[in-house]
Amino acid sequence: MSAQLRIATRRSRLALWQAEHVAALLAARHPGLVVSLVPLVTEGDRIQDARLAAAGGKGLFIKELEHALAEGRADIAVHSMKDVPAVLAPGFAIVAALERGDPRDAFVSPRHASIAALPAGARVGTSSLRRECQLRHARPDLQVVPLRGNVETRLAKLEAGDCDAALLAAAGLERLGLAGRIRSRLAPGEMLPAAGQGIIGIECRADRADVRSLAAALEHAPTRAALDAERGFAAALGAGCQSPIAAHAIVDGGKLRLSGLAGAADGSRILVDAVAGAVNEASAIGAELAQRLLAAGAGELL
């Protein structure tokens, strides 16, 4: 067992918080282990003037981190799992999923209490196709405006009047001590979250048995089951950041219920369905739900 462990992470304050959180947990579980951070700037962080879907998708946030793992400059990478493509590059694995935070989206606004309270024509900031699709479907009278950047940047743009409200991940706001900015939390029935939202994951090279052993101490089995179901759904749809899809699994004992959504980018049509089954069949449940939506016409929407 190595006495040192290097964590590749993005440089945003949220990414650094998550990496430091994992570092503290690993150090507590493995006395004597020295954990250090390797902060990197990813292509997704550099691109601020285009939608991720147009620029290349979720892989833009992890490519440089995976390069560091492959080249031996880092031992693990820490991710917000909603930012990780449903299918990893060959030779890599998600070796631990920490207990899930709040998976819901958060409504943030200096003047309005909820989506329902927004007046017609109000501007809502988001660069997520998933959020835009569901928002346009529920409130076609609203304007959706692009909102890129880290959490602090997006909040600053909101305060500057670039938009009247914004949609962000509740877990990210909580981890940054910004939960007080949340005006309302959107129930999954109102806006289905992204696959993996609220989950911190640990990635490493698939051949690093030593690292797998260290990371296993942080694995949270119910969260892993939910993650496998949600990512299985996204993978079976063949969808990524370029597609408005959503998935949310609830684990209750040995049972798992997965809800999934696929929609048109303009919100004109959405398909929603759910499948339940045994926790130990999480990935298969995800694939089954994807096939049901594809049979209902999801392929045309994606």
Image (spheres, rainbow, N blue to C red):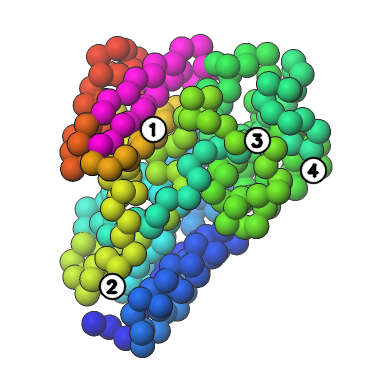
- Disc 2 to disc 4, C-alpha distance: 42 Å
User: Is residue 188 visible from the viewing direction of this image?
Assistant: yes
- Disc 1 to disc 2, C-alpha distance: 29 Å
- Disc 1 to disc 4, C-alpha distance: 30 Å
Picture coordinates of residue 58, whole percent (x, y)? 43, 44
Q: Amino acid at mark 1?
A: Ala
Please tell me whether mark 3 or mark 4 is closer to you in this view: 3
Viewer-closest of 181 and 94: 181
Where residue 182 sits, quadrant-wise, is top right
Mark 1 surroundings within 10 Å by alpha-carbon count, few (fewer than 14), some (14 through 19), many (20 or more):
many
- Disc 3 to disc 4, C-alpha distance: 17 Å
Q: What residue did someone put label 1 on? A: 247
User: Which region is colored magenta?
Assistant: 255-276
Q: Amino acid at mark 2?
A: Leu
Q: What residue did someone put label 3 on? A: 184
Apparent side of residue 180 relative to residue 270 in the rendered image (left or right): right
Q: Amino acid at mark 4?
A: Glu
Mark 2 surroundings within 10 Å by alpha-carbon count, few (fewer than 14), some (14 through 19), many (20 or more):
some
Residue 264 is a magenta residue: yes
Dot 3 or dot 4: first in sequence order is 4
- Disc 2 to disc 3, C-alpha distance: 38 Å
Viewer-closest of 87 and 260: 260
Using the image, tell me which numbered label, if any, was put on residue 159: 4
Apparent side of residue 213 relative to residue 75 in the rendered image (left or right): left
Picture coordinates of residue 175, whole percent (x, y)? 57, 57
Dot 2 or dot 3: first in sequence order is 3
Apparent side of residue 46 relative to residue 27 in the rendered image (left or right): right
Q: What residue did someone put label 2 on? A: 214
Dot 1 or dot 4: first in sequence order is 4
Dot 1 or dot 2: first in sequence order is 2
